[in-house]
Amino acid sequence: MTFIAKPRVHHPSLPRNDLGLTRRDYEGSVSTLCAGCGHDSVSASVVQACAELSLPPHRFVKVSGIGCSSKTPSYFLNKSHGFNSVHGRMPSVMTGANLANRDLLGIGVSGDGDSASIGLGQFAHIVRRRINMLYLVDNNGTYGLTKGQFSATNDRGSTSKKGIANLYEPIDLVSMALQLGASFVARSFSGDKKQLVPLIKAALKHKGMAFIDVISPCVAFNNHVGSTKSYEFTRDHRDTAVNADLILTSPEVMADYEEGAREDVAMPDGSTLRLYKLDADYDPHDRVGALNYVQKMQEEGTVVTGLLYVDSNPVECHDIMGTVKTPLAQLTEDELCPGSNILESINESFR
Amino acid sequence: MNPREDITLNDFVIRFANVNGSGSASANGMFAKALFRMGIPVSTRNIFPSNIEGLPTWFEVRVNDHGYLGRREGVDIMVAMNAETFEEDVSSLLPGGYLVYDNSKELPKSLLRPDINLIGVPISTMLLSEFSIQKQRNLFKNITYLGVLAGLIDIEFEIITGMVSTQYKGKDDLIEPNIRALEIGRNYAVKYLDAPIRFQVKRSDKVGDKIFVEGNEAAGLGAVYGGASVCAWYPITPSTSVAEAFEKHANKLRIDVETGDKNFAIIQVEDELAAIGVVIGAAWNGARAFTATSGPGISLMSEFLGLAYFAEIPAVVWDIQRSGPSTGMPTRTQQSDLIGAAYASHGDTKHPLLFPTTPKDCFDFANLALNLADRAQTPVLVMSDLELGMNQNLSDPFEWDDSTKYDRGKVLSAKDLDELDSFGRYLDVDGDGIGYRTLPGTHEDKGSFFTRGTSRDEFAVYTESPEAYERNMKRLEKKWETIKTLVPEALISMNGSRMGVMCYGTTVLPMPEALDLLADDGIILDHCHVRAFPFGAEVSKFVADHEMIFVVEQNRDGQMRTLLINELEVDPSKMRPVLYYAGLSISANNIYRQISEYFDQNNIAKVFEVKS
């Protein structure tokens, strides 16, 4: 890692954000995933979202588990530290990272094997602890690196590449996240960056546990007829509840949505989260309603996407714990060590 | 008072047999503390069940003016308050010992022994007339037998009444009845019993400025002083009180005076996997972090320990060992996690271990472990045990030098990075096998890298190159050599013998007494108190310099012996195991017996030439 070796050539036409950086400054190394893999679109969406929000590219921590999805933190935000940990345990490593330094933005990337099977427990507990982070699941319903076994999010009846049907019920991480207390829950599709990028932006600005389940088809093992996680199936069976946009400056009125279907939510940093409800009756602030809606649509074979739930007044783990504003990692002997005077009276209490 | 000629002063073992959950712990604790406050060295042992209420529990106090603190076999005074274990308790008394029991109901004669002294006290009957509420009658039984004992062995009474007043400060209505119950007991002993008995206590000056505290409390407090700011844990006996002590002390000592915010985070997580994951994530991101667990937790943490070893991330794990394998005897002590901890995880992994012996060690090792983990960028396990962790132990007082700076190891700042031409996370710049690390968020375009459990080159780039993999593994070996110079040295005392004895952790406690017993029998041994793994040069030398070495430990398989043989490539036949693993701590007598039997069986001359 020499600092001078690789001059970054920016095409002069590339737009620069408020930090004077282009999208290239938010990229990572070249992906080694299969051509057409949904995960690469998710990584590209993260790059675009961070660039558009003008977030400093070194102020993130990227944590993942094991699997195709967990490789992706290499493919975005090169200037940030990343941590490819052990299978299913991204949440605990991210919890520690967040406790140590609350100032850094946490992006955890996991897969359906990582979060719904081996790491289901860690997924559940980080959500209920409300760690301030973006939790992205690249959900393709299959184990890619081990060549195509069903994962726990694979729908019952969906077939493998060899035509064998999955016999077991799927785990729906969105429903679990809603039930367990995530303050921002969304589902999207890697084939729809127009929807996904604004969701990631909104999630990054959300102060609390922001969970996005991204249907991200596996072109090698789960993109055939008979699979319910293919590009084609997802396109044909999607229904969007609420689309979101994050407006950094004063919002302009958009013409293509009816007035009643639009709602602005003020964000802590002064930006505005604008929600466009495609179903006028849908209330994205009703956790139980969202859960019912998602499950009802699922029964009908429809994949609901969009922003499903957002808490306008979220709390995060540091608020719950009452930790100092300064990152714990930056405290010194002055704050950490009680000193010898008090120790003498502590000794006395043991006599 | 009756004049006695056969007095044994400040030297006996007393055992209290109680029912778990009956409130006896408080009275028993006061008994030990009272003797400590009279300046007499005491050691305490809780022998308790894995149960909340109803099963038998024992509390043993060894009183010894020489300062012998290890467990001694046999009981001199038995306070038998549990009908269920009465027969067993009677049989554990040494001949000439005293049985203190409630004779409100007559006991079958068959249960009693002719060679012991019976001290029946009508505790229930006395309390029946004194207290109207049944609950009080039951609860005050404990404090009443404490009063009886005060009379029997001559404890300074005002020390106990003073403790009662302190204990119930704020609940003043409890002070009077407790003191009344104490007096009922004491007065009965003085009036109706042949008090004081043969075993008596007398104010001594052997305690000095020592403190009386549980190892786990010391560990938790030490972690506060050592600058730990993140603690993640999952409840498991006997380690739970480490995290609880950290939280208790941090809540007093780590609060921002202006805002009331906490300068620490403690989190009870869903399992031990998460606990070590949080510690690794926090340490990776720059905090000093630790967890506390016991054997089963170490098994669960193994995969993560391998990650931290290979990805080179600091982590501190307190292993308060208990009897294994599996769930084993979860409330009994043992030193049986050594091999599991030393080589935890798949692949070629090894981790430094520290072996505390006293609460002072626990306090000191808390900071030392955090320093070592930061310096060596690797997990460090502190191998305490139930004996040390959950019993009040006599200890030197805790000390802290205010000029102490935490050793954060090789961490580059933004300024450091600006001054560098290039940065390679796993480059061995200093030739000690330890690279320089950067923390997330340090610099806007220098020093970021990807941490992973997969193989990588010196610049943290993923690689499957055989050469790069081998270079990395060899560098980790070099780091292991460096660690040998960083761990606390063994404490060695040479007596000019050709034979030596090695011990560690709580097996150090009975050693002074065992060595005295052996010396009385003409067996002089050099002594090596191992404090860390990997073994430093002084341990290698000790092993090389002796023809035969006894390794004293509390497990079946001689795990320290195995580590010594394996790591130092020693001929196994010169390493003699001295083992005890039945769940209590090894006694001096047992050590003496095993070693002297070996001498006898092998016709080894007992008196060696001693260099003056």
Image: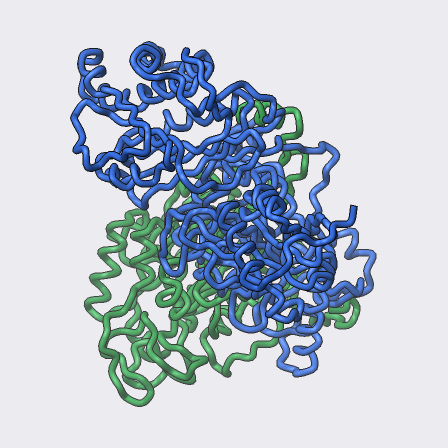
For the residue pair A106 and B49, the one nearer the viewer reads as B49
Instruction: Give the residue at x 78% y 49%.
Output: B611
The answer, for residue B291, to whether it is visible in the render is yes
Percent position (x, y) of residue B211? 57, 29
Name which residue lies at 53% across and 63% down. Answer: B339
User: In this rendering, would B495 be left or right of A101?
Assistant: right
**Which quarter shows the N terminus of chain B?**
top left
| Whether residue A111 is situated above or below residue B539 in the rendered picture | below
Q: Observer-nearest residue: B122 or B305?
A: B122
Rendering coords of residue A212 (x, y %): 41, 60
Quick one: which residue is furthest to the bottom in this view?
Answer: A162
Q: Position of residue A216 (x, y in %)?
A: 41, 73
In depth, the one of B104 and B454 nearer the eye is B104
In this figure, what is the number of numbered marks?
0
Toward the viewer: A72 or B483?
B483
Q: Residue at x 53, y 28 (%)?
A: B252
> How has the structure been colored for display?
by chain
Q: Is residue A93 above or below residue B515?
A: below
Kindly indicate the quadrant of the structure image that contains residue B363: top right
In the rendered image, the vertical position of residue A149 relative to residue A130, given as above or below: below
Report whether B612 appears left or right of B552. right
Q: Which shade is chain A?
A: green
Colour representing chain B? blue
- Residue A80 appears in the rendering: no
Task: Give the position of the C terminus of chain B as an image quadrant.
Answer: top right
Residue B66: x %, y % from top left: 58, 32
Q: Residue at x 55, y 59 (%)?
A: B600
